[in-house]
Amino acid sequence: MKGLDILCLASGGGQQGPTLAAAGAKVTVFDASVNQLAQDRIVAEREGLDINTV
């Protein structure tokens, strides 16, 4: 996974995006729900991971 660009579609919620980022991927999570995206940001911040949310 290291260095791969990953786009997660409708997968906000704090599970897939942060897990992929922890494996070394460059992750963008796209979701229509701001609440779901917030979960990704919370988990990423807590774990010191860099993800992009849209």
Image (tube, grey):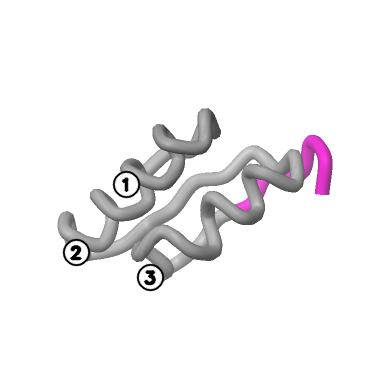
State the residue position of label 3: 10
Q: Rounded to the nearest whole Å, what is the CA distance between mark 3 and mark 2?
A: 8 Å
Disc 1 element:
loop
- Quadrant hosting residue 4: top right
- Quadrant hosting residue 9: bottom left
Q: What amino acid type is highlighted by mark number 3?
A: Ala
- N-term mark: 2 or 1: 2
Q: Nearer the viewer, residue 11 or 47?
A: 47
Which region of the structure is painted magenta? 1-6
Q: Rounded to the nearest whole Å, what is the CA distance between mark 1 and mark 3?
A: 10 Å
Residue 43 placed where, x, y %?
41, 46
Q: What amino acid type is highlighted by mark number 2?
A: Ser
Q: Residue furthest front?
A: 46
Along the horizontal axis of the image, is 14 left or right of 4? left
- N-term mark: 3 or 2: 3
- Is residue 7 located in the magenta-colored stretch of the structure? no
Q: Nearer the viewer, residue 8 or 14?
A: 14
Q: Rounded to the nearest whole Å, what is the CA distance between mark 2 and mark 1?
A: 10 Å
Residue in the picture at 40% in, 33% down: 45
Q: What amino acid type is highlighted by mark number 1?
A: Val
- N-term mark: 1 or 3: 3
Q: Which mark is residue 54?
A: 1
Q: Which mark is residue 45?
A: none
State the residue position of label 2: 33
Disc 2 element:
loop
- Density class for disc 2 (Cα within 10 Å; few <14, some 14-19, many ≥20) is few
Residue in the picture at 45% in, 40% down: 44
- Is residue 4 located in the magenta-colored stretch of the structure? yes
Q: Residue furthest bottom?
A: 10
Along the horizontal axis of the image, is 51 left or right of 25? left
Residue contact between numbered discs 3 and 2, judged by CB atoms under 8 Å? no
